Amino acid sequence: MAVKAPWLGFLLLVSLWGLSAPALLLRRLREHIQNFQESSSLNPGFGLSQDHVAVPKQGWLEQPLDPFNASDRRTFLQRYWVNDRHRAGQDAPVFLHLGGEGSLGPGSVMAGHPVALAPPWGALVISLEHRFYGLSMPSGGLDMGQLRYLSSRHALADVASARQALSRLLNVSSSSPWICFGGSYAGSLATWTRLKFPHLVFAAVASSAPLSAVLDFYAYNEVVARSLTQVAIGGSQECLAAASAAFAEVERLLRAGPAAQAVLREELGACGSLDLTEDQGELLGALQALVGGTVQYDGQAGAPLSVRQLCGLLLGNSGNRSRSTPYLGLRRAVQIVLRSMGQRCLSFSRAETVAQLRTTEPQVSGVGDRQWLYQTCTEFGFYVTCEGPQCPFSQLPALPSHLDLCEQVFGLSAASVAQAVAQTNSYYGGQTPGATQVLYVNGDTDPWHVLSVTQDLGPSEPALLIPSASHCFDMAPMRPSDSPSLRLGRQREKKKEETSKGNCRRKLELSREICSQLGRPRKHLIVKTQRK
């Protein structure tokens, strides 16, 4: 039985969607998976031995609220964690694990990819919580006047400032290379840190990083559909057809009138009525998020369902198939997910969602829903729709529904959101950022990989696409149940790291100039050779 450790959080499995009711469901799913993995981390069978569970050091940095205005003297406290148990000396490498749109606990420096690499490199491991999330909250609440200081650009300025301050506080040598790690949005931040501050950060590892901002993210559900057909993870063409049939039945019942809607509400365990068209769209979106979340987190510890299990339900493989229907399988899937997450019913009220997101009081814990919605409205979009020809679900909710949320909560027009997305891609370069010495790692099951880098951009911009792997799966500790493809991907990374560690003169992604500057091989991290 796993020991409960609510303070231990090492893996940021973020949903990233804009915050409609469907996205809120997906983010609750993310919280559930993270909490499960937190409580399981003290179990040696999960991947951590008992000598890894000593509580790391917590610290606070005083950071400028507005780093772009030297005359503004306001500051806030930004939290960080330190694990120095593997540190080999003053000039050891520093692995900096960046936080994303949620709280960051001590587990961020106790398990996962950076910590797994720390012993052979004698590295110091640090994690940095993102401003406006977790306990790194400026005073003054979350009104629009305060949220203007929340953006990826502000976060990058914090990383640069923290890098310099922590070097002094922790007595890090000027010759020590700093390597940024991050998953999902934080993976994008790791890439952009290397892009904007190459003199401060030597290299970066970006896992499942959506580098391209996009207003209408219809490709998300196209990948979901494709993943439902992947035989390697339990999918099939029949499973995809069954999913489409289940959603068609839900839409039929919604159109059939109040009596049928009442039956649907009872059968799906819905919290509210289905009288309003906007709530019907939110229900369909919540069901999409349930299926999408199953794909996005397939095979991960704590996920209520895998693709194999979902397909089994939709196809009636778990019982009397002659009496089963895809719709019945979808109902069972909803029950399993709600029960697993401890939710009483399936929530989809648009009015309740808007009211919740308008609250300006910061939450001490959680994923920061209002903050992330603001970032999607002012930087990224990421609004998942089902308007593409290959989408098996309902076309509701459509893009205008997502954009209306920016207007209802923040007073931001659809035109301003579209302009912000374009500016983000212009500023960072989208899927061709031009940052050298960055390793991009993705799984082809993960719907977010289509916004990342999946092919080598150059000798010092390698990419690794792991078959049948889901969102940020490579960042988690190794488990006996990991798929063969994930193990192979990790072995490839490890082999390349070991090869580079032994001989810096070989044809690796680092140039000879950098090798000569670094001197001893242990002073640098080579994450991957260029693929032949």
Image (cartoon, rainbow, N blue to C red):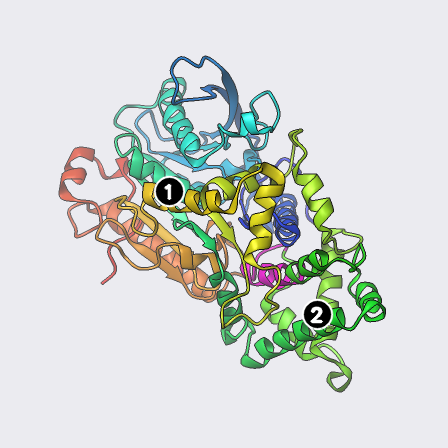
Q: Is residue 268 above or below residue 167?
A: below
Tell me where residue 149 appears, x and y as whole percent. Answer: 48, 27
Q: Which residue extends farthest bottom? A: 322
- Specify the quadrant of the image occupied by residue 181: top left
- Tag 1, which secondary structure? helix
Q: Is residue 184 above or below residue 142?
A: below
Q: Nearer the viewer, residue 393 or 489?
A: 393
- In reply to whether residue 287 is colored magenta, the answer given is yes
Q: Which of marks 1 and 2 precedes in the sequence?
A: 2
How far is the residue under mark 2 from the one under mark 1? Answer: 40 Å
Tell me where residue 118 appears, x and y as whole percent. Answer: 40, 39
Tell me where residue 151 appears, x and y as whole percent. Answer: 46, 34
Residue 44 can be seen, yes or no? yes
Residue segment shown in magenta: 286-302
Q: Nearer the viewer, residue 28 or 152?
A: 152
Instruction: Please give the name of the residue rendered at 51% of the width and 76% of the height, measured from the top-left corner.
Output: 231
- State the residue position of label 1: 423
Residue 125 can be seen, yes or no? no
Q: How many marks?
A: 2
Q: Is residue 246 above or below residue 274?
A: below
**Amino acid tagged 1:** Gln
Tell me where residue 335 appears, x and y as whole percent. Answer: 76, 62
Q: Residues within 10 Å of mark 1 (few under 14, many from 20)?
A: some
Q: Nearer the viewer, mark 2 or mark 1?
A: 1
- Specify the quadrant of the image occupied by residue 125: top left
- State the residue position of label 2: 330
Question: Looking at the rendering, in which quadrant would you find the C terminus?
Answer: bottom left
Q: Are marks 2 and 1 in contact (CB under 8 Å)?
A: no
User: Viewed as shown, does residue 92 lie left or right of 184?
Assistant: left
Instruction: Please give the name of the residue rendered at 44% of the width and 29% of the height, measured from the top-left corner.
Output: 84
- Tag 2, which secondary structure? helix
- In reply to whether residue 105 is colored magenta, the answer given is no
